[in-house]
Amino acid sequence: MLLKKIYTLVFIRKESQILLGMKKRGFGMNKWNGFGGKVEPNEQIIDAAARELKEECCLDVKTSNLKNIGHLEFTFEGDSTMMDVRVFATDIFEGTPSETEEMAPKWFKHDQIPYDDMWLDDRLWFPYMLKGKLFYGRFHYQGFDKILNYHIEELESMESFYAKKK
Ligand SMILES: CNc1ncnc2c1ncn2[C@@H]1O[C@H](COP(=O)(O)OP(=O)(O)OP(=O)(O)O)[C@@H](O)[C@H]1O
């Protein structure tokens, strides 16, 4: 039986740029990624998304401006936990990205995404996000540097995806 743990992942967009953060500690250390983390007990997923964004790069977003654009599932060989990641994006935010103890933020142009210093799965699903498509992806890893198998698909709507999932 897989134990599911819910995570958030938030991308801030500005014109043709996207904000990524260099993770300074913990899971995914030394990789660029969006901002996010675990959803706390009794916390709404969307509230966790806004909280983690604020904690990790000091930006404020209204939850009503966060759009759910994708769903990712990660499993790791020999580990019975599935990471269930809700991906959000917005171009409406307040503040200036600032470095925190967890993340160092930086804007990237769409054709300069630093895939070599990111999770291997990112280069497979970022193109959907950058084109403004909704997506579902699942990835089974061996260790952290090898994907044994994966599946990605474009979605029509997140609502119908979650309705079918139930
Ligand atoms: C395996 N391939 C992956 N590809 C892309 N993104 C991935 C990922 N695996 C995890 N992620 C994201 O990485 C963050 C980890 O969060 P993580 O630091 O563990 O959470 P949180 O801040 O709550 O932790 P602590 O407070 O340090 O315990 C979180 O956004 C999650 O969605």
Image (cartoon, rainbow, N blue to C red):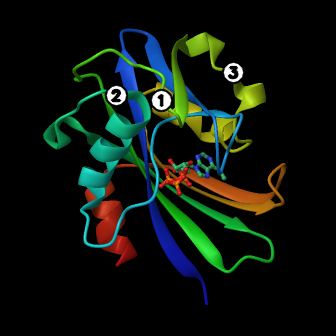
Residue 49 x, y percent position in the rendering: 33, 47
Distance (Cα) linking label 1 and label 2: 8 Å
- Residue at left 26%, top 18%? 95
Distance (Cα) linking label 3 and label 2: 22 Å
In the image, residue 97 sits, relative to residue 51, either above or below, namely above
Which labelled disc corresponds to residue 58? 2
In the image, residue 1 sits, relative to residue 148, either above or below, namely below
Residue 25 x, y percent position in the rendering: 64, 42
Tell me the residue that label 3 is attached to: 114
Query: Viewer-nearest of labels 1 and 3?
Result: 1
Secondary element at tag 2: loop
- Residue at left 71%, top 57%? 150
User: Looking at the image, is mark 1 or mark 3 earlier in the sequence?
Assistant: 1
Q: Which amino acid type is shown beneath numbered disc 1? A: Thr
Front residue of 104/157: it is: 104
Query: The N terminus lies in which quarter of the figure?
Result: bottom right
119 to the left or right of 89: right
Q: Ligand 1 closer than 8 Å to the CB at disc 2?
A: no
Query: The C terminus lies in which quarter of the figure?
Result: bottom left
Mark 2 closeness class: few <14, some 14–19, many ≥20 residues within 10 Å: some
70 to the left or right of 26: left
161 to the left or right of 25: left
User: Looking at the image, is mark 1 or mark 2 earlier in the sequence?
Assistant: 2
User: Looking at the image, is mark 3 or mark 2 earlier in the sequence?
Assistant: 2
Q: Which amino acid type is shown beneath numbered disc 3? A: Pro
Q: Give the farthest residue toward the front.
A: 101
Mark 3–mark 2 contact, CB under 8 Å?
no
Tell me the residue that label 1 is attached to: 100
Q: Give the farthest residue toward the bottom.
A: 1
Residue 42 x, y percent position in the rendering: 25, 72
